[in-house]
Amino acid sequence: MSITVTLQEKRVFAPSKDFVQHAAIDAKTFRAWQAQAKKNPQKYWEGAAQELRWKKKWTKVQKTKKGSMSDTQWFLGGKLNVADNCLDRHVEENPNRLAILWEGEPGETVSWTYRELLIQVQAMTAGLRKLGLAKGDRVAIYMPLVPEAAVAMLACARAGLTHTVIFGGFSSEALKDRINDAQAKAVLTADGGYRKGAWLPLITHVDTALKVCPTVKDVVILKRADVGGANRFKKAVGEVDGTSTAKRHDWYSLTGSLKADEVKKLGQPEWVDSEHPLFILYTSGTTGKPKGIVHSSGGYLVGALRSSRMVFDLKPTDLYWCTADVGWITGHTYLVYGPLAAGASIFMYEGAPTTPTLDRFWDMIERHRITILYTAPTAIRAFMKLGTQHPKGRDLSSLRLLGSVGEPINPEAWMWYRENVGGNRCPIVDTFWQTETGSIVISPVPAQTRAKPGSATFALPGYDVAVVDKGGKPVKLGSGGFLVIRKPWPSMARTIHGDPERFKTQYFTEFPGLYFTGDGARIDKDGYIWCMGRVDDVLNVSGHRLGTMEIESALVSHPTVAEAAVVGRPDDLKGQAVVAFVTLKADASAKIKNDPVAASQAKSDLRVHVTKEIGALARPEEIRLTESLPKTRSGKIMRRLLRELAVSGQVKGDTTTLEDFSVIASLQHSDEE
Ligand code: WTA
């Protein structure tokens, strides 16, 4: 098994007649959309915006400051509320439609109709307002994957608060950085959650972080035992210890203590401008600390809704499962906002795919009759390794569509997914997009596109995608280059929180006038796009974005470390693995010399340190202690050499720019582990 995306240009899979016949979007509609998007993208997006409910209609579809695509606004003058679109309008149509079916890792389930979900969201909206939070305030959400996580997001949206969800796997350090950057006034969290059979105590991380988060005034804590609201009136307000000055509130005591007329009054939606920031989501880039990507309300939801309907073929009879956590963009757009805006029934699962049994995923699909599955290549490759007996042992006949996201999917994994999960029957949508794009950019439209395993196929209507050379010119069919988007689209990020200049330089200067994804791609003879992964210093480990600089900063913040360089090594399961080259300060270096036990201890200390600074997801797979790092004469670390070393253990190629040849020798013998 190899994760390299080998171009299999000739292998093509057409959707079955049955799928085409029953598709939510027929060929005629799709072709009309394509033609309109090409001719007049603003008209196309205006049509998509009409699928939402607006309190006040926009007066202008799009405005871009002259010559600067980075400065674009959509649906100007329009007013709406995202939660109203995700909840109220569906409740008015059919209050009893299933909104969320959730299963906890230990096995309990919660099922909420749209009406029940709305009641929860109204109560929390009122609760947040009662705490004094008001439009424009920022709120951090640090929760396990429980239905209340969606309530938290939607309640913020309803009250006009801007949320920032922080993945529960991030450490207290990472949490603190994000809370402080966003200047969050409140944190919505839980005492903990379950993962791989273990208890993850989230609240202890919050406690540690809040010692140095002066802006936070209130913390709302969900007791994991109360998920679903079953025990809501039995619990007293928990006085929980902690050293910060923030007030602590028990989730269901806060919402349950409100009188009906208070909920009615304080639970109303806040009508916000289309451009009002719905959320900030931190993501790794090529420099320093993660940056807070800001998304709008109107444009974002237009992109989320249109793509959810088009790519996932959503119908009222579906039970749709996106396996992403709310801490990532996929969990925002395709677990919560997109499908709920479409009125779909979503399935949500708290825990690990193989707990307590190796077939947990397939077991849940069989029991709940899940119809659409959207997951990451890393998960598929892990399932491949476990063997076909697990999916084969369950009845997966309810599935009708499969999706993949987050990293290139190798054709072997694509084929395995199709055969063993999709029964050779389900179309696969390989969806390329990013935190910054807000919604899917390149993907097959399941009933309309003939798929090639390993290719995300074509741009969706309304996204002007191109593969260009260094000069920004489109490459010829059959060649490779850089993936760019040439025109603004509604769900594009609006800025980086607190750093608008960086937003411009990061994405819009490499190719003037174009948005640069940071990815490389090939376009084959038939015009199919093959996304090949990042061409910058961003790693993709198990579908999670990590900046090499971010891990390097974490390493050099350890007192024994002098210098660190981090590179990615191709990994059969994770896509990429983190390899760190580290030089220690003189005294620490002397200690480990000729002492393998001390060296091994030093490496494990560094791994623990990275886990503390960022989270387990960034922990280096391999640490190589070395006397010095290979540098050019101008002092730049030669990453190419390090990458070669990480992959092969040896260096080939040109080394004449090396300042010190001896470092290569020391590198090659430095890792005894
Ligand atoms: C990569 C995740 C190939 C890509 C939605 C991008 C992909 C980064 C695909 C964004 C795909 C995502 N094929 N590569 N289908 N989907 N990527 O911001 O390198 O966490 O730039 O968003 O993931 O990661 P992010």
Image (spheres, helix red, strand yellow):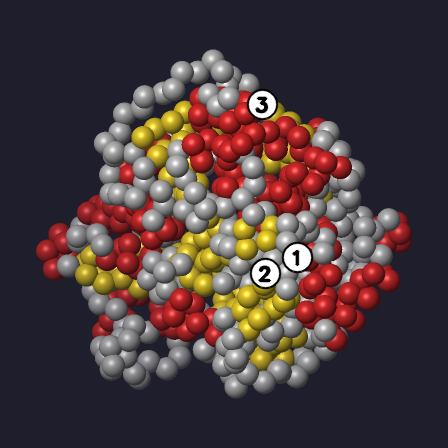
**Amino acid type indicated by mark 1:** Lys
Mark 2, residue position? 77
Q: What element carries label 2?
A: loop
**Amino acid type indicated by mark 2:** Gly
Dot 1: within a 10 Å radius of its alpha carbon, few (fewer than 14), some, or many (20 or more) residues? some
Spot the residue most to the left.
Answer: 587
Instruction: Examine the image and state in which quarter residue 85 appears.
Output: top right
Total residue callouts: 3
Distance in Å between CA atoms under marks 1 and 3: 43 Å
Mark 3, residue position? 108
Lower position in the chain sequence, tag 3 or tag 2: 2
Lower position in the chain sequence, tag 1 or tag 3: 1
Distance in Å between CA atoms under marks 3 and 2: 45 Å
User: Which quadrant: the N terminus?
Assistant: bottom right
Mark 1, residue position? 57
Residue at x-position 22% and y-position 49% = 602
